[in-house]
Amino acid sequence: MENNNEVKQENTFTIVNDEGKEIKCEILFTYEDEKTKKNYMAYTDNTTDEEGNTKVYASIFNPEEENPVLLPIETDEEWKLIEGILTSLSAPEEEKEENAE
């Protein structure tokens, strides 16, 4: 993937897809894993799937780069990590409180 990512604000950035179209994305969260020593970003382009769910994407990135390149997550372990964070963030507040007890 070419370095076509331009950070606009702290929580949004623009990517250029394969057809040259600019797509504005919103960062949902970033996470640095102590075990893998990698930085992960979950983001959305605020589009929805057939069932009305917001599409969410995740990538590896280097926060030290001025225009970070988004790299694919390659292992099932990394995907499970990201899915766990997304699940905890999207759980209703009551569930979060129950799980904390």
Image (tube, helix red, strand yellow):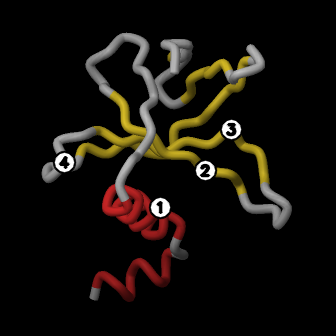
Do callouts 4 and 1 mark residues in contact (Cβ within 8 Å)?
A: no
Do callouts 3 and 2 mark residues in contact (Cβ within 8 Å)?
A: no
Mark 4, other Cα within 10 Å: few <14 / some 14–19 / many ≥20: few
Above or below, 62 relative to 92: above
Q: What distance separates the C-alpha of mark 4 from that of mark 1?
A: 18 Å
* SS state under label 1: helix
Tell me the residue at 63%/32% (across/down). Answer: 25
Percent position of residue 46, x then y: 72, 43
> On the picture, is 23 further left or further right than 30?
right
The disc label shown at residue 56, or none: 2
> Label 4, on which residue?
36
The answer to whether residue 57 of the structure is visible from this angle is: yes
Percent position of residue 8, x then y: 55, 16
The answer to whether residue 6 of the structure is visible from this angle is: no
Mark 1, other Cα within 10 Å: few <14 / some 14–19 / many ≥20: some
As drawn, the residue found furthest toward the right would be 50
Marks 2 and 4, the one that precedes in the sequence: 4
Q: What distance separates the C-alpha of mark 1 from that of mark 2?
A: 9 Å
